[in-house]
Image (cartoon, rainbow, N blue to C red):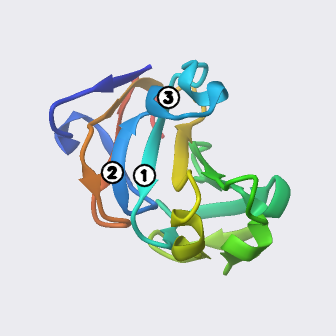
Amino acid sequence: MIQWLPYLDATLGLAIKSPATGQIKPVTTHSDLLYNANVLPQALCIDLQHGTLVSPFSGHFTNSLHGGRRLTFKHKSGLTLQIDLMVSQNISPSMAIKQLVGSGQAVQQGQTVLRLDLQLLQNSDECKAVLSILPHPAIAAVYSSEYFVEASNDNAFVIQLKNTKI
């Protein structure tokens, strides 16, 4: 489970930069039942305010699901961050999502991986991304805070590690 703090303190552990700009909220605030049922213990929701998504760290990038709506970033340590983009059923993902990096490629921290047509998305009822840290044996705790983040500048998560190195 994410432990929600009044402010995110990077001294608690390994900081993971936000791949998107917007307001971080608990995943339970999402309108989709899959997310608001809290079945993803290390996930949060971002109300997107900017149409650019960047790599949160250097590693391997893949995208999947219809129209490339699921982005996966895997660090060389095995740490994996997954992003699910919410695109209204009334909008074709190919109209709203422009992939800038091909699936299966290496990416650098801060590298732009896709652009969203926010004007098209903001006319719909959903303009959100769900960020999930996938389970890893070295993770002891995951922290976040409800606040506005800027992609590649502010932290979305801070991960406290067990004695194992990531």
**What residue is disc 1 on?**
47
Q: Is residue 60 left or right of residue 159?
A: right
Residue 74, x across and y down, in percent: 63, 52
Q: Residue at x 28, y 26 (%)?
A: 4
Rounded to the nearest angstrom, the CA distance separating label 3 from label 2 is 17 Å
Image height of 86 relative to 105, above or below: above
Q: Does dot 3 land on a helix, a strand or a loop?
A: loop
Q: Residue at x 38, y 63 (%)?
A: 21
Q: Amino acid at mark 1?
A: Asp
Q: Is residue 40 left or right of residue 141?
A: right
**What residue is disc 3 on?**
42
| Label placed on residue 23 | 2
Residue 57, x across and y down, in percent: 48, 61
Q: Is residue 112 left or right of residue 149?
A: right
Q: Does dot 2 land on a helix, a strand or a loop?
A: strand
Residue 76, x across and y down, in percent: 60, 53
Quadrant assignment, res 157: top left
